Amino acid sequence: MFHLGLLAGLFRTKIQRSAHCREFRVAPASYAIWFCIASFCVSLSGCGSSEGLGFVTGVVKMDGKPLANASVEFTPIDGKGLTSYGRTDKEGYYYMMASRTAEGSAVGRNRVKISTYEVIDNSRSIPETVPTKYNTSSELEAEVKSGSNTFDFDLSTSGGRVVNRKSDASNQ
């Protein structure tokens, strides 16, 4: 268990008094601690940046009906930029997040994957209901621009094959 006294000691500045004079000075060890704290704070200032991202929202439907609880993934086709993720609500509405604090998707052409498959634990999963042409072999693309973007996807079950990953693994 972490001792609170140790934590308090890290933030306390040591003051040493010289034996020959009345001046006080800060011990060199304290400089190192304060330098580390300052460096950490400066490094955090870049986190959560939305530079190079466009805000992305939309609605996903399957055969004209909202597709609830589906994962949505935008991956830059050129490989430059972050992959972003979203999840649809009960009305099929989604918005994309590039990180925990940065909303949006990478500006440029993105491959879009939509899936309902989800692993709950080692013995249970939510089955896939979306054809492979929208997820593992996705044909969907979106051109994300700076600013706000809306991409609605109306998927169709006809003509597409649905692959349940769990059953595929047991057949091999």
Image (tube, rainbow, N blue to C red):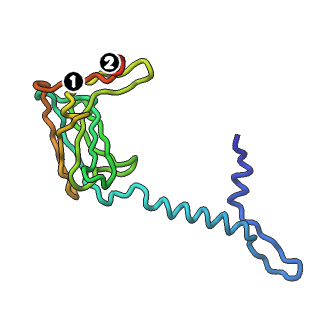
CB within 8 Å, label 2 to label 1: no
Residue at left 43%, top 18%?
123
Q: Residues within 10 Å of mark 1 (few under 14, many from 20)?
A: some
Element at label 2: helix
Residue receiving disc 1: 162
Quadrant showing the C terminus: top left
Q: Is residue 157 above or below residue 43?
A: above
Earlier residue among tags 2 and 1: 1
Mark 2 neighbour density, 10 Å: few (under 14) some (14–19) many (20 or more): few
Q: CA distance from mark 2 to mark 1?
A: 11 Å
> Is residue 19 or residue 73 the one in the foreground?
73
Residue under numbered circle 2: 167
Q: Is residue 113 above or below residue 164?
A: below
Q: Please, is residue 163 above or below residue 113 in the view?
A: above
Rendering coords of residue 6 (x, y %): 73, 51
Residue 129 position, x and y percent, is 23, 24
Helix, strand or loop for disc 1: loop
Residue flagged by tag 1: what amino acid is it? Val
In the picture, the disc for residue 112 is: none
Place of residue 92 in the rendered image (x, y in percent of width and height, measured from the top left): 21, 33
Amino acid type for the residue under numbered disc 2: Ser
Residue drawn where x is 45% and y is 21% of the image:
122
> What is the residue that sits farthest to the bottom in this orientation?
21
Q: Is residue 118 above or below residue 110?
A: above
Number of marks in the rendered image: 2
130 horizontally vs 10: left or right: left
Residue 161 found in image quarter = top left
Q: Which residue appears at 28% of the width and 55% of the height?
A: 53
Image location of residue 165, percent across then percent down: 31, 24
* Along the viewing direction, whichever of 13 and 116 lies nearer the viewer: 116
Taking the view exactly as shown, the residue that stands out farthest to the front is: 172
